[in-house]
Image (cartoon, rainbow, N blue to C red):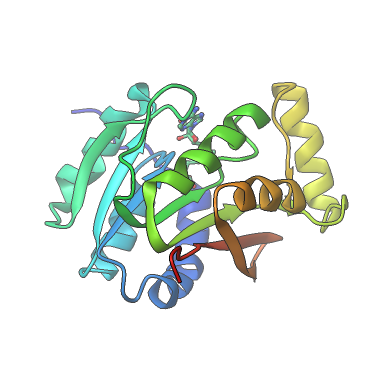
Amino acid sequence: MNEKPFSAACERNQSYILEQLKIILASARNVLEIGTGTGQHAVFFAKALPHIQWQTSDLDFMHQGIKRWLYEANLPNVLSPISLDVNKDTILENYYDGVFTANTFHIMPMASVERCIKQVGHALKEEGVFIIYGPFKFNGKFTSSSNTDFDALLKSQQVHQGIRDFEVIDTIAHSVQLSHIQTIEMPANNFMLIFNKVKTGD
Ligand SMILES: C[S@@+](CC[C@H](N)C(=O)[O-])C[C@H]1O[C@@H](n2cnc3c(N)ncnc32)[C@H](O)[C@@H]1O
């Protein structure tokens, strides 16, 4: 079997993210991760959050690497990746207590970001949480010169890539009953954006 894929960024950020997930997902029972990537995050978080059934997902070509991490970790609460391309696949409706995605929104085209948020709006149960980790702009401004440089690099690699505006994400989220409840500043000029699915019928 080939080597497991490895992300140095995951290694650096996972403890800081976990600290927050312990609080935000304290009463969650099932969480969908969109754009799982290597699988490192899934294993690290699921191990530390045994009350949660962690569902991995990504584009099909990423599955082999994720499965390597899952096979080695052999955890009872992390599930094999489902095929989830936010552009075409649909997520089970009204099913998850939480949806987590890290470092995906600056990679996907903006149309995919929009479709992703709208799908999450349907996939979450009432009062479920959507957690988005990564770099963002606020009021049209980058939060650091390193993020300005990162945005230029992303665009030079693929024109559709780029650091997204918090306000745009918030507007889309609002359209599917996702209410912004918190922005957490994270190390290395990253953020966690937390949204809550509005409870209807009150
Ligand atoms: C920069 S990686 C981040 C991976 C991981 N979450 C992390 O923090 O290391 C971006 C991920 O988004 C996934 N991705 C890109 N386009 C996608 C799409 N249309 N639907 C679902 N996932 C997508 C990629 O396959 C990749 O795993």
The residue closer to the viewer here, 6 or 159, is 159
Residue 109, can we see it?
A: no
Q: Compared with residue 187, is residue 87 higher up or lower down, i.e. above or below?
A: above
Q: Compared with residue 17, is residue 177 higher up or lower down, i.e. above or below?
A: above
Query: In the rendered image, which quarter contains the N terminus?
Result: top left
Residue 125, can we see it?
A: yes
Percent x, y of residue 162: 73, 35
Percent x, y of residue 121: 48, 48
Q: Compared with residue 192, is residue 152 higher up or lower down, i.e. above or below?
A: above
Q: Residue furthest front?
A: 201
Percent x, y of residue 123: 38, 46
Q: Is residue 72 left or right of residue 48?
A: left
Query: In the rendered image, which quarter contains the C terminus?
Result: bottom left
Q: Is residue 183 left or right of residue 7?
A: right
Q: Is residue 177 left or right of residue 75?
A: right
Residue at 15 percent across and 56 percent down: it is 75
